[in-house]
Image (cartoon, grey):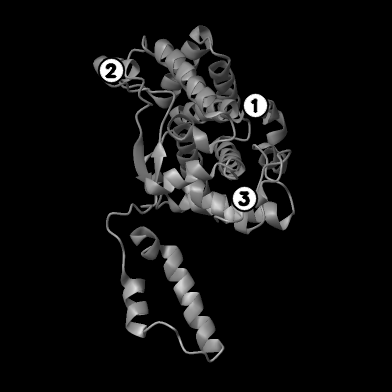
Amino acid sequence: MASYICSSWTKVALTCHHVNSISLQRPLRMNSWVASLLLKCRLKIMEHWDETIGQCSVLVLHPRPILFDFIRRILQLPDQERKVKVPAAVKICIFDVLRSSHSNECQLSNGTASLHRSQLGESFLWACNSMGTSDIILTWHIATSIIEVRHPYRPNQEEGSSTICNQHKIAATHLSRYCAYLVTWCPELLPDEDEWSKCLYNAVKEDATRVLAVRAATRPLTPEVEYQDLVQLLSEDSKHEVLKNGVRLGKQLVELVEGEEAAWAMLAGFWAEMILYVSPSKNLRGHSMAIARGGELITLLWALLFHVGIVNRPGEPDFTATTAGVV
């Protein structure tokens, strides 16, 4: 009861009631000092979203101590996560894709719509034909990690940089690692069956870790040499189909004739559409638990899409009635 009274929802409802009372020239049924107290009240034991997103990566190029990974596998713990502030480039990219899709009355897709909008995207559609959404996420995540090795961040390429290419790179890499984080930490919020998604992530991660274990990291390498070594290792020794497809896609992106800027622009559009595509959900319990933990970006996007009229993915049954009472 205390969490409900102190919630943002109660404050919004109280404000609306106050405005309506004034417009209808009706006296407010609650003393003004009580209303003022409730508006200022914030329950400190409640978790609030701190505008951060989790980040995970399948390709660990700088591994942690072997003992740590061994303990993690024995205890069946999910992959290590880290939290970062949501960059402005991520928000801009998501809203640009949402605005474009909504204004053109186009349905969100698993990335294919953004590829169709790109002049270069047709040759990359094969990487969106997997059976499951988690397969597609991990395939494009691996590819994004590979192109990031070839074109790493430089001191002048931080978020404050004004170049469009850098903003696309920031958006693509952060959303890529956030989607990988969702697969291993919050699979219940994704379209696929959660246990299957976890098993898929662990299988791909294990295969990548096995291949990269022989990687020599005793001397600093140039991005070109590190990229060549990484692709050669993964191409020759990887066994999992998702890992193989990710390497193939990564090479295709790096070798794009139009160059790095075109590749990052296409990746930013793909990842923004992907995070919007996976956001509609009928798993109210999963989102309520995420809110109890402090909230997730995908939960906020779920609520946003509901209010703009996007309540399900193409081909799925309409579950408006299921969610209408809680959003």
x, y percentage for residue 157?
41, 44
Does 169 sit above or below residue 3?
Answer: above
For residue 127, which numbered disc appears in the image? 1
Q: Which image quarter: residue 242?
A: top right
Label whose residue precedes the other's in the sequence (3 or 2): 2
Q: Looking at the picture, which amino acid does disc 2 mark?
A: Ile
Q: Looking at the picture, which amino acid does disc 3 mark?
A: Val
Position of 121 with respect to 232 (left or right) is: right
Label whose residue precedes the other's in the sequence (3 or 1): 3
Q: Which residue is mark 3?
A: 97
Label whose residue precedes the other's in the sequence (2 or 1): 2
Q: Dot 1, how many residues are within 10 Å of its Cα: few (below 14), some (14-19), or many (20+)?
A: some
Q: Which residue is mark 2?
A: 71
Element under label 3? helix
Residue at the extreme bottom: 25
| Residue found at x 48% / y 71% | 13
Mark 3 and mark 1: Cα distance apart in space: 20 Å
| Residue found at x 43% / y 44% | 290
Q: Dot 2, how many residues are within 10 Å of its Cα: few (below 14), some (14-19), or many (20+)?
A: few
Element under label 2? helix
Q: Mark 1 and mark 2 in contact (Cβ < 8 Å)?
A: no
- From the image, which quarter does the N terminus lie in? bottom left
Let me know if residue 66 appears in the view: yes
